[in-house]
Amino acid sequence: MDNYTESVHDVKVDSKESAFYVDAAKYWEQVPPTVDGMLGGLSSISDIDLKGSQRFLNSIYQLVECPGKERALDGGAGIGRVTQGFLMKNFPVVDLVEQDRQFLEEAKKALEPTKHKGQFFNIGLQKFIPEVGVYDIMWVQWVLGHLTDDDLISFFIRCKSGLKPKGLLVLKENLTSSGEVEMDNTDSSVTRPRALIIELIKKAGLRVVKEQKQQRFPNDLYEVRMFAIQPV
Ligand SMILES: C[S@@+](CC[C@H](N)C(=O)[O-])C[C@H]1O[C@@H](n2cnc3c(N)ncnc32)[C@H](O)[C@@H]1O
């Protein structure tokens, strides 16, 4: 068996975990393991999203100090929509981190008949500790609103150690236009304004090297931006 065994790493839920995380886990437990489920009924935007991500990744590889193309991480991977639709086309090895076991099992099932190589980690990002110095790209999409500010800073710091020397962490997230943090009690998440995201990135000792707004999304959605970030 090689390093990229397709076993699901099991990590037990901490009983002391706060209601913010427990409520989110309960919400996702009752969501169907489908693209529609992942995108809150908006599976119609999945293709546009994946194409926008590909364009952003291409622009990253035009940077002078660009990362390698060997191994990526999909953070908050759900059923593997981003892994299968985009990351796997660029990286021979893609690891998935997802707190919901059912989603991760679905991802595993969907990826089995493909050429996918990579590990599956069944754990929340607030606890995930990446292997040191192995990732060219860590792609984290539509999940960071499930982490508290403090946990997000700690997650960013752990990601720094997971990156190869020229590696990049990429965030793709909704942003509020009100300048305020907006709480969603349905799925127990927050949506942050751009300024707060930048502040948290800086607090973790990282800097934005490239930023782009996702184009062609319906106007009634939050603005979505991608940030490629690197240790200062
Ligand atoms: C909106 S879906 C996005 C899934 C995937 N990133 C995509 O774009 O298709 C949010 C995902 O984050 C997962 N999630 C929620 N809280 C999490 C946490 N604390 N750590 C890791 N994953 C989490 C959910 O289970 C769900 O799969």
Image (spheres, rainbow, N blue to C red):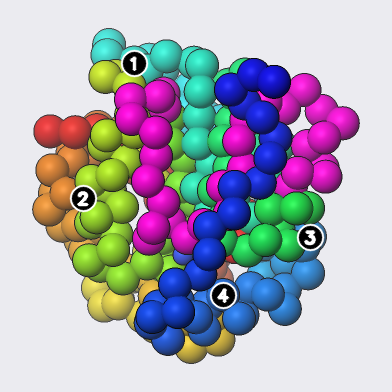
Residue lying furthest right: 113
Asked if the residues shown at circle 2 and circle 4 are in contact, with their CB atoms under 8 angstroms apart, the answer is: no
Mark-to-mark CA distance, 1 and 3:
34 Å
Magenta segment boundaries in residue numbering:
107-136
Quadrant of the image occupied by residue 15: bottom left
Mark-to-mark CA distance, 2 and 3:
31 Å
- Residue denoted by label 1: 66
Amino acid residing under circle 3:
Thr
* 227 relative to 205 in the view: left or right: right
Amino acid residing under circle 2:
Ile
Residue 14 visible in image: yes
Quadrant of the snapshot with the C terminus: top left
Mark-to-mark CA distance, 2 and 4:
25 Å
For label 4, the crowd category at 10 Å Cα-Cα, with few meaning under 14, some 14 to 19 and many 20 or more, is some
* 98 relative to 127 in the view: left or right: right
Q: Specify the label residue 34 is tagged with.
A: 3
Residue at position x 40%, y 24% in the image = 134
- Residue denoted by label 4: 25
Q: Quadrant of ligand 1?
A: bottom right
Mark-to-mark CA distance, 3 and 4:
16 Å
* 197 relative to 16 in the view: left or right: left
Amino acid residing under circle 1:
Cys
Mark earlier in primary sequence (1, 2):
1
Q: Nearer the viewer, residue 101 or 227?
A: 101
Image position of 93 with respect to 149: above or below: above
Asked if the residues shown at circle 4 and circle 1 are in contact, with their CB atoms under 8 angstroms apart, the answer is: no
Mark-to-mark CA distance, 1 and 2:
20 Å
